[in-house]
Image (tube, coloured by chain):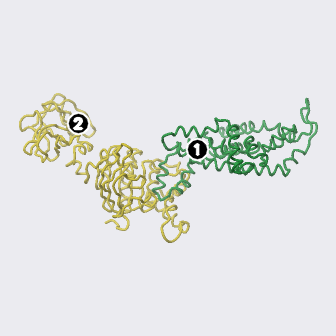
Amino acid sequence: MNGRWGGRLGVGLLVAAVLLPVLPLVVWSAAGTWRYPDVVPGRLTRRGLDLVLDGEVVSATATSLLIAVTVAALACAIGLSAGRAIGLYRFRGRRLVQFLLLAPVIVPGLAVTLGIQVFFVRYGLADTVLGVVLVQLMPTVPYAATLLGAAYANLDVDYERQARTLGSGPLRTFLTVTVPLLRPALVTTALLTFLISWSEYILTLLIGGGQVTTLPLLLFAAIGSADRTAAAALGLLVVLPPVLIVLLVARRLRGRDDAWMGLARG
Amino acid sequence: MADPTLAARLDVSGLGARFDAVTAVADLDLSLAPGSFTALLGPSGCGKSTTLAMVAGLLAPTTGDVRLDGSSLLGVPAERRPVSLVFQKPLLFPHLTVEQNVAYGLRVRRPAGVGTGRASRREVATQVEAMLERVRLGGLGRRRVGELSGGQEQRVALARALVLRPRLLLLDEPFSQLDADLRAEMRALVRELHDEAELTTLFVTHDQDEAVELADTIVLMLEGRLAGEGPPETFYAAPPSLAAARFFGATNEVHGLVEAGCFRGQGLLEGALTVPTTAPHGPAVLVVRPEAVGLDGEVPALVTATRFAGSDVLVDTALPDGQPLRVRVPLGARVAVGDRVSLALDPDRCSVFAQEAER
């Protein structure tokens, strides 16, 4: 009983730590005027809410979701194959491959993007959702490959060999044995890459050329125009997925003794 | 007699596996009669698991052929071979329950021809439950894999392999991670399942007691090569090679000379230690198990040490030329360090090998 209450307290603290910094945003998004030294805003407004329900914001949210989900799925797929190679096999040049996979994180993405922008324009990928998805693989694949590479390194491939001798072909073995065994790492990778994509600004702006409008683009525009209510309302929308994800994690941590984010190995 | 439609004949010929410069298995010939229980015995690293992997289709051989009932399995992927393999580790899929683990092979292995896997869902459940009963795990089907003990896990692994009704069952040291009591219990279970299901079984082990207790035929492998083959008794009564004799615990080796079909111990009195042999003329080694030596003969020796070994006593002696010879005598025999004794070597239980055979 004691341990259970301790656990609940821990989860409560975790949730508070995540939600408290968001509180000023909530207040600002509803504040008409809020001047020093007032403790609460002088006047409340619906403008923030109206803005969030506006067509432009709704469509930007949809675009953001589409891009982030696609990027997460592709990064996981690439990360699974690259991670298998670096995690399971010992081959000549493995360290170099490992470094090259991490390189996009080390080399400033902006520098690279300015270079590849020329090619994206030439191949008609600039100003398209597909182009933005492709360019966002740059900051996500390194993490996906590294996380899944570590997961593969811990994988006992005898499970796969056992499945083969039980009559399962390579693809079926991958789907019914390998993926479930890698599930904790896959969930982590999917969420992490989703979040990177969701909050990406510069690459989207450069390749999307203002034609592909995602939430961060609207948010930065609002901040630039010094409209604090709009910025706060959009900011809330942008932090919503991370907060939801943390709440989800908190639920899972409380609900089941499961391996997650490498916190524990089930 | 074994059911000819189920138990298969296995023929391995000229099988070899090479990894870069390392030869793991070389020129291995092996034949398993339908319904036989064969132990592939050898120390770790002798290539026995590699051999098993090649029979199962998990590793492509560098040379040679693997045939099941006469037709070659080369080029047949592991998942299409009518062969089941149980590993050293249980390797139960942790995301599935016990019954889902046992049903795994039935679900993925779609029989050629009529019907889909889906149609026989009820039949799968019946087969799985029956199989779990046979490995004495009836009623545990709904358990999560993590809730099982080590012995139960390995029994689930056995059930998962046997429910597919394999024509050849391969076991790769399946009990080596269990403790002694459990190991004995599992041996009995495996032998029972083998006889019941009329299987052809190839069992890999490094434990000669296990091989002797379980198998009809023992195939000894040393350094990637065949080092002897035959019923278990052979390896005690007439080991096929010096290495085989050593592996089976014949620890006494006396160096000497073969002359005119007779082995004579070096530096011994004329006629003191002579054993008739068919080994060729020249330097030779006589091998004898400690239990085949008595204290009522005429080979003089000096007792150098005695050690209590539970049901008997191990007596270390030195022959006149200093060569050691260990004797196993019953409890109660009055022998003390420093005693002069006369050893008797049972000629029928001595083996003589030409010196060149030793490498």
Disc 1 residue type (three-letter): Leu
Chain ID, yellow in image: B
**Residue density around tag 2, few if under 14, some if 14–19, many if 20 or more, within 10 Å:** some
Does the image show residue A44? yes
Nearest the viewer among A220 and B31 is A220
Q: Chain of mark 1?
A: A
Q: Position of residue B278 (x, y in %)?
A: 12, 48
At x 33%, y 64%, the residue is B70
Judging by the rendered image, the residue that carries numbered circle 1 is: A148
Question: Do circles 2 and 1 both sit on a common chain?
Answer: no
Q: Position of residue A207 (x, y in %)?
A: 73, 45
Judging by the rendered image, the residue that carries numbered circle 2 is: B314
Q: Chain of mark 2?
A: B
Nearest the viewer among A152 and B326 is A152
Disc 2 residue type (three-letter): Leu
Q: Position of residue B314 (x, y in %)?
A: 23, 36
At x 87%, y 47%, the residue is A51
Chain ID, green in image: A
Q: Please, what secondary structure does the residue beneath circle 2 have?
A: strand
